[in-house]
Each structure stands twice: as C-alpha cells, then as structure tokens.
Image (tube, coloured by chain):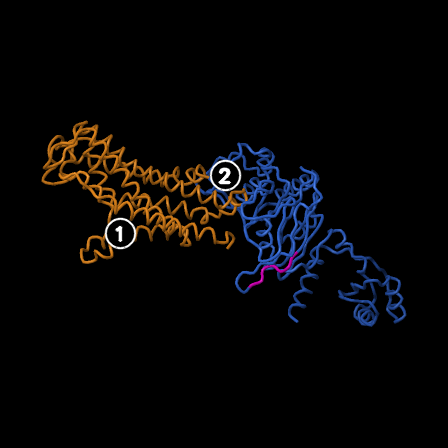
Chain colours: A blue, B orange
Amino acid sequence: MEPSTDPMVRARELSKRYGRTQAVSELGFAVESGQICGLLGPNGAGKTSTMRMLVGLSAPDTGSAEILGSPVALGAGVLRRVGVLIDGPAFVPHLSGLGNLRLLWSATRRAWPPPALADALDLAGLGPAIDRKVKGYSMGMKQRLMLAQALMRAPDVLILDEPANGLDPAEVRALREHLAALARHGAAVLVSSHQLAEVQQLATHIVVMNHGRLVTAGPLAGLLDDTSTYRVQVDDGERAATVLRRTAGAATITVRGGEVTVTAPGVPARELVHSLVTAGVGVTAVHQASRSLEEVFLTMTRGDDDHAAR
Amino acid sequence: MLRVELTTQLLRVRSLIALACLAAVPVAAGFATASHAGHRNGTQGGLFGASTYSALNHTMASLAFIAPLLLPIAVALPATAIASADRDWGTLRYLYVAPVTRSRLLAGKLAAVAVTTLAATACVLVAGLLSGLALFGWHRFHVIGAPTLTTGAALGRVLAAGGYTFLCMLSIAAIAFALGVLLPRGTEALGAAIAFVVVAGILNGQSALHAVTVVLPVHYWQNWTHLFDPAGAAHLGAGTAAQIATIVLATGLAVLVLSRRDPAA
C-alpha cells in the first residue's frame, strides 16, 4: 500500500436528491487506514445512497467523494483497489460461481487469478458448489460469493452494504475476523448494517445518519463510554426521577422500577446522589452507564426524529 | 468487455439453440427438396425454383427464406439481451465498480452485437452451403431463364448478398439494442423488436403505404435477391443508406440514453 496522508475514504459535503426526496444532505466523514467504520442509520437514512456516491455509481449533486485521495466517478481507476458489495448480490445466473468471479475480474483486463482468490474462496466456503450455476444458489451462498468477489482483489478499501445479510452466525463471525485482519494490515473498511450488535463487535468507528444528514461520527468506544450517564439504584424510582428533573444539568431521565438512568453532562455523580439523599430518596448504588450501540443509536436517531417532527 | 459480453450472451444455451434453429432450416429445406437435385424445384421460380441446382443456389434460397423473419428474430434475441441483461441481473453495478468505464462497456456491447449478428448470418450461409454441398453438389449457379453464372461471378454475388444481409440484420440488431436500453426489461425489448419486424413486414406488403414503408429498413431487406435475377442487376444503394441511417440513429439513441442514465437509478 502506498503511504499517504489522505484518508482512505472521504465524503466531502455530499448531497444527493432523487426527485423531491433529499437522500443525502451535506454529509462529511472520513475513514482512515486500519479503521472499520460502521455506517448506521434507520431505513431511508441515506446509507446506500452515500455508498453509491462513494463508489461512483451515483454522481453527487454537490460535494465530492474521494478514495485513496482520488476523486471517484463512474468506472474510476481507483476502484481497482476497492472491494464493493452494494445493493445485494448480483450474478450471471447461467454461469458458475467461479465463472462469475472470473468474468468480473477479467472485465478489468487483469490476468486471472486475483491476488487473494484463495483466501476469499476459503471465507466463502462454497466448496464444490463454486463450480455449479449460480441460479441454484441460496441467498446465503450468493452473499458469500459476492463477498468473495469483493475480497479476492486484496483491496485497500472495502465498502460493504449489509455484508452479513443471509449469513449464519458462524459465517458472520468468520467475516468479522477476516475484516478485522484486513484492517490490521492497513485496509479501511466501511460497513453499513442494521445488525447493531454485530457492528459493535466489529467496528472501531461509526458514522450515524438520519434523514440524509450526519448525526455523529467518531470512535465507537468514545460513544459507548459516555461518562455523563449513570445508573442509580434507589428505593423509590418515581420520586428519584422527580428530584433529578429539578437538578441542574440533568438532560434525560428514564425510570425502570428502582433504577433510574440519568444523563447529566458535566455533573459529578456525587452531586446527583447528594440531591437525592437531601430529598429523602434512599440510594443504594451508582454505576457509570456502559451503553450498548443499540441504545446509543436509538437515542440519537429518535432524538433526531423528534427534532425533525418539530 | 467484448469477451465478457460474448461469454454471457453468445455462449448461453438459448443463443446456441437459436443458432441451431437457424442452421436447421437450410438442412431441413435441403432434405425436403433433395428429390429434385439437379432439376428445377417443382414449379417455383426465382431463387426457390433454382435452389436444387447447386450448393450456392441452395444457400441463397435458404437466405431468402430466413432473412425476412427468422433471422431478424434470432439477431434481436442476443441484441436485446446484450443491452439489458446486466441491468436485469443487477451485474451492471458490479461491472462499473470492477471498474469498467461507461465508454468501454458501451463499446464492448456494440462490438458484441456486431459479432452475434455476424454469427447468426454466417450460420445460415454456412449451413446452407454445407447442406447444399452434401445434397446437391458444387455446380455452377443456375439462374432460371438466364445463362448459368461463372463460379467467380456467383461467389461475388453471394458475398455481396451475404454482406448486404449482414448490414440489414445489423439495423434490426441496432433497433433491438436501443429498445433493450430504453425499455425496463429485456423480454419487453425483445417483444417490441419482434413486433416491429412483423408489423413492418405487413406494412411493407401494402402498396398503398409505399410512402410510409420506404423509410422502414425492412423495406429494403430483400433487395439483394435481384442480384440473381435474369437481368442480374440490383440497386442496393438506397437499401444500404437506409440500413446505415437506421444503425446510426438507433445506436446514437442508445448511446445517448446510456450516457445520461444514472446507473444507480
């Protein structure tokens, strides 16, 4: 891989409109070498539109997409260094699995076989079925063959739209390990997925979108280790919530039985406890909350929906 | 890209079956008329009446029989598929990110249309020649009501007929290709292309519609048969111009649509 100071993938103020629908609006983010970036968002958030622009399948109305420092357009040469899975698997049905891989590879006028074919086929695990016609494949087999197509070229950048669709748990795990290994060797990986638990295990960074706009972007660990959220065990949850709502700095409060989850940026835990105890609420324990990606995602996108509704 | 298109279209079972059907017609016609070998084929005149005199006679009669309908359909089948199959299958996006540029993709497709059209036309000629050699032998080209042609003259006219028919088939292939690009699915494009050939053929038979039919490429497809009239004269200039104009228009339309279409739309 050539040394470069540019991010491996960069979206600069990308906007795209389809008719009356603003699919993506002024979206900007970057994925560096060694990062696995999860591109998250509810259905219709603009994830696939963003990925299409990043691989040149769709021209942005404004802004630009760059890969390895080069601007991306339809059929751009830099895409030779990119493995892509987008809008699901697609093959010539009357050709074998291997025939399809050979076809897509030879279309770029490169000598067969591709550099990482053996590893890619090993991950796909299709065995003798690789020589059978694709029209007889199951959805999972097609997905694995498409992943092999993306990986066989030993890409420096991977852009994968819902790569775990149709895979069983063991295959998902194998894919996760393969992508992690590629990232360790310097590849940049951008993955869109609705399987948040899977993304939490895989990604080093996330980009969250909603309504075509960027909600947040950054290291996953920083988003999950939110130091401003606490879980407080109390003897009266409802009363504790009433007290905390009057406490300066408490932003969100949720009650589940005797446990109150409170987000209060910049407020030390001892001040929250002091407020509760002073008001006569018994506090038995306080823990800094470690949130799941699902919780973080739902909080972010729900808030954005509320905002949008207003 | 030419190899990609030929691998996916020309070498698929349905294309090979179509070619086999084209080849089967001259063979079947040869067997049906073999009893007249060396003599006039019944009471028929023109190319069909002379088809039993020699291998080249049989070849040209076969071409005259197949060229108005069967050959255009066999040519339109791969042309529509070449234009639309990768969109139908979804493989177009994976070709673009492979990456293949739009101009290279288009050039490959157009070249593939030309090759498949040539293959279909050649299939008829070769099958006619081989079955004619086996059943009627290599003799001088017989023209009813005129002296036989020398081998050189006959070969020249056969090549001219084959080349002209190839050009005519390219025009319907270009129309089929443009329909394949314009219409949402390949099957719809094939249906439209076949409907065009049939309707244009019917219109061409209506003398009252002469002013309309002269602008249709189909109107000139059989002009080459006059190469083998007793007078031996054929005016292929207008037909050639009509086919070239059709090819340019249809290909230009297809290129325009492809170059402006958002591949992700």
- Quadrant of the rendered structure where residue B150 is? top left
- Quadrant of the rendered structure where residue A295 is? bottom right
Q: Nearer the viewer, residue B41 or B14?
A: B41
Q: Nearer the viewer, residue A180 or A276?
A: A180
Q: Is residue B168 left or right of residue A141?
A: left
Q: Is residue A206 above or below residue A91?
A: below
The residue wearing badge 1 is B198
Question: Where residue B116 sits: x, y (%)?
Answer: 36, 39
Give, as a single range, the part of the protein colored magenta: A21-27
Quadrant of the image containing the N terminus of chain A = top right
Q: Which mark is residue A209?
A: none
Discs 2 and 1 lie in a common subunit: no
Q: Nearer the viewer, residue B106 or A35?
A: B106
Question: Where residue A277 sits: x, y (%)?
Answer: 89, 68
Q: Chain of mark 2?
A: A
Question: Is residue A33 part of the magenta span, yes or no?
Answer: no
Question: Is residue A22 part of the magenta span, yes or no?
Answer: yes
Question: Where residue B208 sits: x, y (%)?
Answer: 18, 58
Seen at 72% across and 55% down, the residue is A292
The residue wearing badge 2 is A107
Disc 1: CA contacts within 10 A as few (<14), some (14-19) or many (>=20): some
